[in-house]
Amino acid sequence: KKELIDYFFRVDDASRPVTELNHNLDAVLKEKLNMKELALVLFHSALHGSDRGVYGEQKIARRVIENHIQGLTDKVLRQQDGHTAYTLSHMLLAFSILKMRPPERLVQFIEPKLTQVVSEMHAKDIRDTLKALATLGMPLDKGFFKAVQDRVPQIKHEFNGYDLYEVFHSLSILDAVGENLHGKKRAPLANIFGPLISDPQVRQKLVENDDEKTRRMLLDSVFWFKGQTPLAYTPENGDASLFETDVAAAFKYAGADMKASEPHPVTKHRIDLKAAFG
C-alpha cells in the first residue's frame, strides 16, 4: 500500500508512461484506502497528469483519470470518516484541475460534510475551496456560504495578499453563477465580500501584493459587487484580455473549435469569443 501511495505523491521523474498511471489507478480501486489517501491520489493524478504533463499528452492522461472517476467515487462514498477541510478541498481542487464537474452523487455526499468543517478551515482551505468551486461553476447552498461568512472574520489575519485576490475573484464568479441559476434567491456572497474588503489590514495586504493580473482580478470583483471600481482599467496590449485568453484556452482544451471574432447580428457589438462544439 505504501509503495502505491508513494507512486502518486513522490513524482520525481521528468516523465512517466501513461500506461503506468492507468495500472496504478486500477490498483487504487482494489486497495483499501482511507478518505485522505483517496483525495490525494485523485489530486496528484490530476495535478501531474492533466496540468503538468508528467504522463505525456495531457488529454490522454486526463481521459485515463476520468475513466477511473466512477470507481473512485464508489470508494469515497463508502468512507465513514476522514472528511476534513484538507481532504474535501483537495478533492474539489482535483476536479477543478481536470475541469470536470464531480458526479452528482459525489457532490451530494461532499456538500453537507464541507459545510460541517468550515468552522475548522484556515485561510488556505477557504481559498482553495472557493477557487475550486468557482472554477467548476458550483455555487453550493446557503448553509455553506453562511458558514464561510461566519468563519472568515475569525481567520482574516491568516490571509496573505495572494489569498485575498483569489478569494475575492472566486466570490464574484460564484455570485455571478448563483445569480444566473437562482436570481435573488442565491446566497448573499456580498455579505462575505463587503466586510472583508472594508478591513484596513486587508486593504494593506492587497496593496503589498499588487500586480497587473491581481489588480484586474480585484477590479472585476469590486465592479461585480459594487457596480463601480475605484481605479480605471489600464489598456492591455493586443486585442485579447488576460482572462479572455484563459477562457479561450479552456474552451479549446475541452474540444471546442474557436471561431474568429465578429459583430453580433442584432446588437452589432463585437463578440470577443466564439466557440463551437461538435
Image: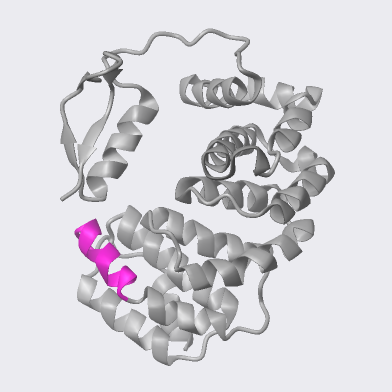
Residue 219 in the image: state x and y as whole percent.
Answer: 56, 20
From what the image shows, is residue 149 above or below residue 210?
Answer: below
Residue 255 in the image: state x and y as whole percent.
Answer: 20, 50
Outermost residue on the front side: it is 266
Q: Is residue 218 visible?
A: yes
From what the image shows, is residue 175 above or below residue 131?
Answer: above
Task: Please give the range of residues in magenta.
Answer: 55-67
Q: Is residue 61 magenta?
A: yes
**How many marks are shown on the rendered structure?**
0
Residue at coordinates 24% horizontally, 57% vertically from top-left? 58
Residue at coordinates 45% horizontally, 9% vertically from top-left? 234
Residue 267: image quadrant is top left
Residue 67 in the image: state x and y as whole percent.
Answer: 30, 74
Residue 64: image quadrant is bottom left
From what the image shows, is residue 11 above or below residue 124?
Answer: below
Judged left or right of residue 121, residue 29 is left
